[in-house]
Amino acid sequence: MPGATGLPDAAESEALATLHRVFGYEAFRGEQQAVIEHVVAGGDALVLMPTGGGKSLCYQIPALVRPGTGVVVSPLIALMQDQVDALRALGVRAGFMNSTQDFDERRMVEAEFLAGELDLLYLAPERLRLDATLDLLSRGKISVFAIDEAHCVSQWGHDFRPDYLALSLLGERWPDVPRIALTATATRATHEEITQRLGLPSARHFVASFDRPNIQYRIVPKADPKKQLLSFLREEHAGDAGIVYCLSRNSVERTAEFLTANGIEAVPYHAGLDAGTRAAHQSRFLREDGLVVVATIAFGMGIDKPDVRFVAHTDLPKSIEGYYQETGRAGRDGLPSTAWMAYGLNDVIQQRKLIQSGEGDEAFRRRATAHLDAMLALCETAQCRRGQLLAYFGQEPDPAGCGNCDTCLTPPETWDGTVAAQKILSTVVRLQRERGQKFGALQIVDILLGKRTAKVIQFDHDQLSVFGIGSDLGEGEWRGAVRQLLAQGLLAVEGDYGTLVLTETSGSVLRAEREVLLRKEPKKPSGSRSGGSSGSSGRGAGKARAVAAELSAELLPAFEALRAWRAEQAREQGVPAYVIFHDATLREIVTRWPASVRELGTVGGVGEKKLATYGEGVLAVLAALNESGAAAGASPEPARSAEADDWPEPADEPEPDDWI
């Protein structure tokens, strides 16, 4: 007879026992139960879960329950050592094989695999193209194949990896071994392509909610992005760990130097740095508290640091998929976090230029344009940003809004911009038809404002009939209007100099056949870190508060004492602090204040191995706090379900040498 989870009683008992014994949780969360049930029974699965949704358990538990070794295909070799270290800290027999190892190290892992002494073996997709690797796997016992970052198989996706195309051979060569493909984000088209290219026609599909209610999404008008970023960090995230994404390597270097010069410890990360420097900066970010990494999109895949409190963008991402994955690296522990972006007119023009001048055929440019249009729609929306994100991935948003994004907290006004749009389009028309000229947005705005700049005088633009007709709006308002017309497809960018031209739909505005609504940005972006009381009180805000209640002032010293103890343990062992315990676990410890090893074992995230390794140390810290007069915590909380997804999440278009 099946048990409560739908598994046969023995399998259910073993899966739940493994969850508690190894990972320290009492119950599965969300779709985990159904996925594990299916894979343990031998079925193939395609799993779409957001960052922090618990994907790793969906293959780790089956690998531990089923006989043999679970083989995990992971695209980023730079973090395999950390992944394996974290599993070994849980008592899981894990290993990896990649080009960072010498001959003897690889031979030792091979011997452990053949002897059945590994629960999990991590491999890069490139290694599965080697006959020697396939021969090795054929001589061992495999429990499950897990294909992580499965979106990398999509040629239309933002992270295409050609080596993933060969992974369909796993099903052909090992038809009796279940396969589970996992990704944190995929549109319906990418979802279908994963199914086809990996040869998973009979796989059961599991699609979890893409909502991350603890993340507050904010997009502010770009003025001076470095100073805006500095203000954001100082006012809201002083001392917090976070990631700042910039479009270019030069911008990365300048921003990191600027933050450091202004008292915020920051390091750069991009493919132009040598491999040793990149590895050192990545290691510091994983192991130190409060460090900021300023990076191109090359940084992030595989980073599972749970206490990243913010992700900031100083430039516009190329797609919603990329934006979602990058912002998803914040708040993996479920605590309040911020996704902040500064966005302006030049971002739109630059991205349009990159598409038109970049490599690729017309089909590629159309797809890139569609991705950008969706990203622009997110930036310009007057509706709930979270709702727009969820709708993009095919999920029904809450019509009441989320209550934890800037458009919910400070709802923007909209205004009838039809006349303003006509003035902008008329200026473009006059330049082209009367002068045979094309200019960029700055010149258009100067003409509308009646500014007799050197360039205006040089080209006699002060003689145009439209000169000075825009004195009713300020420069920022005109720039915003141009930006929104570009986003709505009523203007287009052409050529290397980013000149503005009309589109097929411009005529309907000029003929007054179409109304143009424009978004009026709030004068002062919300400074609320976790939601505040303004705006909608949709269920998102309630969920965010529920998953991350702040500790009382009385308990903060105990929390910091445990963090200091954890940091010392991490230094001694040469591992990231979260490998010892996540912040969420430390918060629960000080809230419940266990008085014995047995009580400590009931805390979420404290499995048998960690209890045996660290239990006495934790209790010693609490005992010392008791002696010094620290107050004990509140009464015990109910049992927790599996919280954080402990392993790699996809990134947007890593630079090529980030993979090796």
Image: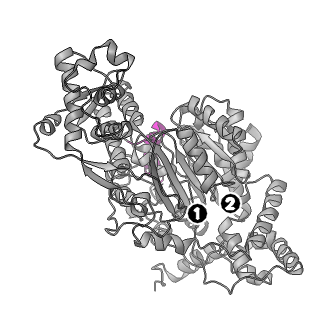
Q: Residue 263 appears in which quarter of the rendering? A: top right
Answer whether residue 170 is magenta in the image: yes
Horizontal relation, residue 182 to residue 116: left or right: left
Q: Residue at x 31, y 32 (%)?
A: 365
Residue 390 within the segment the image draws in magenta:
no
Q: How many residues crowd mark 1 within 10 Å: few (<14), some (14–19), many (20+)? A: many
Residue 528 showing in the rendered view: yes
Q: Quadrant of residue 305?
A: bottom right
Q: Which residue is mark 2?
A: 87
- Tell me if 416 is positioned left or right of 106 in this view: left
- 395, 266: nearer the viewer: 266
Residue flagged by tag 2: what amino acid is it?
Answer: Leu
Mark 2 or 1 closer to N-term?
1
138 sits left or right of 473 in the view: right
Marks 2 and 1 sit apart, C-alpha to C-alpha, by: 10 Å
Q: Which residues are magenta?
A: 157-174
Q: Compared to 316, does 27 lie above or below?
A: below
* Element type at mark 1: helix
C-beta proximity under 8 Å, tags 2 and 1: yes
Count of numbered circles in the view: 2
| Pointer 1 residue | 60
Query: What type of secondary structure mainly makes up the magenta span?
Result: helix
Image x and y of residue 385, in percent: 38, 57
| Number of residues whose C-alpha sits closer than 10 Å to that of mark 2, classed few (under 14), some (14–19) or many (20 or more) | many
Residue 512, x across and y down, in percent:
11, 41
x, y percent for residue 416:
22, 49
**Residue 648 in view, yes or no:** no
Camera-nearest residue between 332 and 70? 332
Q: Nearer the viewer, residue 206 or 8?
A: 206
Q: Is residue 6 left or right of residue 114?
A: left
Q: Residue at x 67, y 43 (%)?
A: 282
Q: Position of residue 497 (x, y in %)?
A: 36, 21
